Amino acid sequence: MKLPHKVSQWLNTIPTFKFLFLLAVFLLLYAVAAQSFLAFKQKDYKDTQSSQLIDFIIKSGDQQLKPLLASNRYEDIPEVIASLLTYQQLQSLAVYEANGNLIDKAVAKPAVTAQTLLPKVSNLSIKEQETAYVIYQFTTPNGQLFANHHWLYYLSGMVWLLAALTLLLKIKPNRASKPVVAALEPRVSYRAELKQLLKRSQQQPQSSNLLIIHANWELYNKKPKQILLSLFNKWTAHNKSSLVSFENDLLIFALPEELSLENFKKIQILESCLMQLDFNPTLLINNLKFENAVYQHFFSIVEPGLWIEASEDYLQTLSDIIKTDIEIEVEDFGEFHLLRIDALTADDAMAIERQTRFLLQ
């Protein structure tokens, strides 16, 4: 059975130890309540059984004694009494005449204290005339006869033990992780990150291949600058790239002179990082160096993603990874294609996600 969404959310917010602790308390209270209920039901059942047996013994005794009293066969009364005393609940039995004279009496076992005996008197009438009466002494049901249902507490005890183990396991990793946290290298400062990025830009040779990124850079003012700067610094260092300029909302990086499918994967990693930071970027790999107005026109007609400016000869090389193909013409440059590419395989997508986490650490 599926739990309601709000109940499921509430359960997910409860720490494991607290959940187990509350469950153990609930099971303990349930066990106490169930124990009391079962004890009451068992005692009530035994009382009912005992009452029915007493009524049966009295009725049987009266039916056997009445004919003997009517025919004055008093010598057979001890035999009837002896047979009745075979019932464990019957402690003693005494038969008296109507005037109180004792006819016969017998005790089944050593005398029991008066508090444990339940007396019953039965009047015997013959021809509508009271002839005799019989006093039966019964033992009362023992309050200790009904069983204790200790098994109800076992489950609660197991959950208490599980809660204790969970708490111990939670404490040990926390203690073990303290030295690791202390050993982590401090994050490079903002000034040092900027210095490294600019130094790399000055040292890298000129390249005809450019990566032009259009994004909602206004988010840059709302996010810590350190994260974005650290991302660019790590990515350019690992991909032999450098920062060229950042103006008119276009961020431009120089790429290696020779591009391959492996380079495209690395650029997709940068795209994934910017997506994680909510920039929703559009990236263009270009080597024709258009004017800014042309770039702005490109970014106004294409959707976010990774695009490559390519000639007809390049289409065959990229045929396996093309997702969208837009044919476009620019004055002084002629016709060419804008190609959108996607993750190459499922393994590539997993590798991109893994590298994204690394760069954003």
Image (cartoon, rainbow, N blue to C red):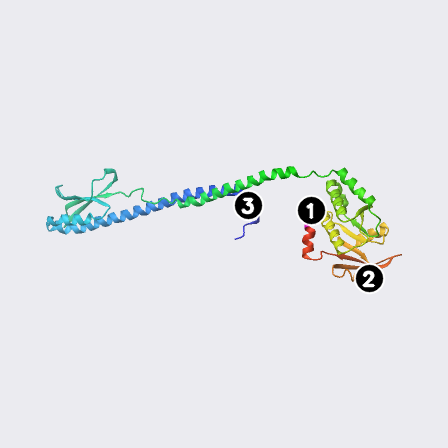
Q: Helix or strand or loop: what does disc 3 sit on?
A: helix
Q: Residues within 10 Å of mark 2 (few under 14, many from 20)?
A: few
Q: How many marks?
A: 3
CA distance for labels 2 and 3 = 59 Å
- In front here: 10 or 334? 334
Q: Helix or strand or loop: what does disc 1 sit on?
A: helix
Q: Residues within 10 Å of mark 1 (few under 14, many from 20)?
A: few
How far across and down, in percent of the image, does residue 340 sit? 76, 57
CA distance for labels 3 and 1 = 32 Å
Q: What is the three-letter code of the residue carrying label 1? A: Phe
Q: Residue 100 vs residue 42: left or right?
A: left
What residue is drawn where x is 81% and y is 44%? 201
Q: Residue 342 vs residue 135: left or right?
A: right
Magenta range: 354-360
Residue labelled with disc 1: 358
Q: Residue 325 vs residue 40: left or right?
A: right
Residue labelled with disc 2: 313
The answer to if 108 sits in the magenta stretch is no
Quarter of the image that includes the C terminus: top right
Q: What is the three-letter code of the residue carrying label 3? A: Leu
Q: Helix or strand or loop: what does disc 2 sit on?
A: helix
Residue labelled with disc 3: 11
